[in-house]
Image (spheres, coloured by chain):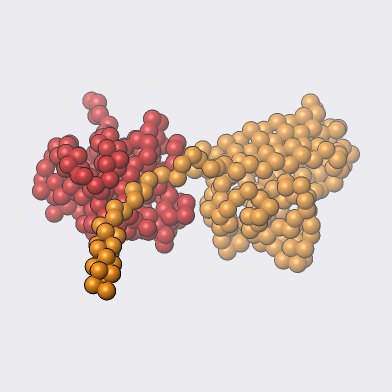
Amino acid sequence: MKKIITLLVLLGIVAACAPEPAIPRGVGSPKVPYVVCLEETSDIFADTGYLVIDLSDSTNWPHTNTNEIIIKNVRWCGAVSGAHEWHAHLGVITENDGTDGSATFIHDQILVSLSGMFDSDHVWVEHGLNLRVSSGALTYVGSSITDDDDGTWATDNAITATIGVTGFVAAGDLVLLMDEETDGSTVDFAICVEYDTE
Amino acid sequence: MLTTVAYCCQSFEQSVRKAAGIAPFTCPPYDANTFDWRLLRDRDLIYFDLHGMPGRAEWYGDERIVALTTHHIKRADLSGTIIFAINCYLADEDSPMLDALLDAGAKYVIGGDGRNWAGSRSLFGASLLGLWFRRLLSWRVEPLQALTWAKRRVGLSLHQGMAAKDTMGFRAYYREKTT
């Protein structure tokens, strides 16, 4: 019995003296940005909305955190079939309900086909642009380019998403709106977005 | 008396409390959105023990929560402040965080390149360096001399040889002023 107690005490002392492991103060190679891409080749001819990043869906989208999107780079190209005006908007859902929703846009292109094609590559420097939505507005963006009370953004309206399925938008999601200003032509496009979430 | 502020991963709080001599702000619960960058102003010493990532313009707390970015550092006037940071990759070539700290006016930035090592509870490696560096500063030893002596003290440490050896690579970085 005495030997057992002595052994246990010795083991306790050894355990207490065991060196604590050194922990590195780094998280290895950069894991971001995440990238999502969408290609639309079906010659759209009317106003159409797309879900680029579903912030709350970390299952189908590659990101982990779900509080806000940090957009870093967007590469966007496409072609219009005729000399009619289209507006291409990239922005964030600020509010929505079962009837409609609103979006504020952060990156716009006006497409009036003379050459038939457009190509845009935009980088947000350093940390990127924080697309946090709070109280129905983007916290770090001031933009008068909005799409208000549009049924496209209703909570139960399924729209095409970058991950190859349809999705449902909510506040904080990154969306794209192809907006036909003048009737008469169709548009195809491809977009890739590099981003992070926090 | 040395005015100090410390900001670290929540999991490193025990060791930072000992090394920095004060209760640190931790991430979590603080993060890049809630940490008040104005706390970095008018300090003799700022002690960081967060996670770095190669080439990134931010530091992280536990679970990769963003703790601080170059945006915050650039808004804080760090004139005359000495920065001691255990964070990995701080002294890498083209380190955005090192540039931001020096651009903000830091007198010296003490840090190491690549991975840096320390404990979460006890002091060894880079945290032991931090303890002795802070003590020597408080005894009014000139910063570069304090770093040299603190490294000698770490070199005597028998505990965690790898961490101690890596810590020998810590350097003082500063901007030369030109007239």
Task: In this rendered view, identify the residue nearer to me: A160 or A31.
Answer: A31
Task: In this rendered view, identify the residue nearer to me: A147 or A96.
Answer: A96
Rendered-image quadrant of the N terminus of chain B: bottom left
Q: What's the residue at 25%, 63% (across, down)?
A: A10
Is residue B76 visible to us here?
no
Q: What's the residue at 75%, 55% (across, down)?
A: A167
The relative height of residue B47 versus residue A41 in the rendered view (above or below) is below
Q: Outermost residue toward the bottom?
A: A1
Q: What's the residue at 23%, 72% (across, down)?
A: A2
Task: In this rendered view, identify the residue nearer to me: A39 or A94.
Answer: A39
A42 on left or right of A193: right
The relative height of residue B158 versus residue A4 in the rendered view (above or below) is above
Count of labels shown? 0
Rendered-image quadrant of the C terminus of chain B: top left
A93 on left or right of A117: left
The relative height of residue B140 versus residue A55 in the rendered view (above or below) is above
Q: Residue B119: percent from the left, percent from the top? A: 31, 51
Q: Outermost residue toward the right?
A: A184
Is residue A165 visible to us here?
yes
Q: What's the residue at 72%, 47% (across, down)?
A: A163
User: Which chain is rendered red in the image?
Assistant: B
Q: Residue B71: percent from the left, percent from the top? A: 42, 45
Colour used to depict chain A in the structure image:
orange
Q: Residue B20: percent from the left, percent from the top? A: 23, 54
Q: Residue B99: percent from the left, percent from the top? A: 36, 35
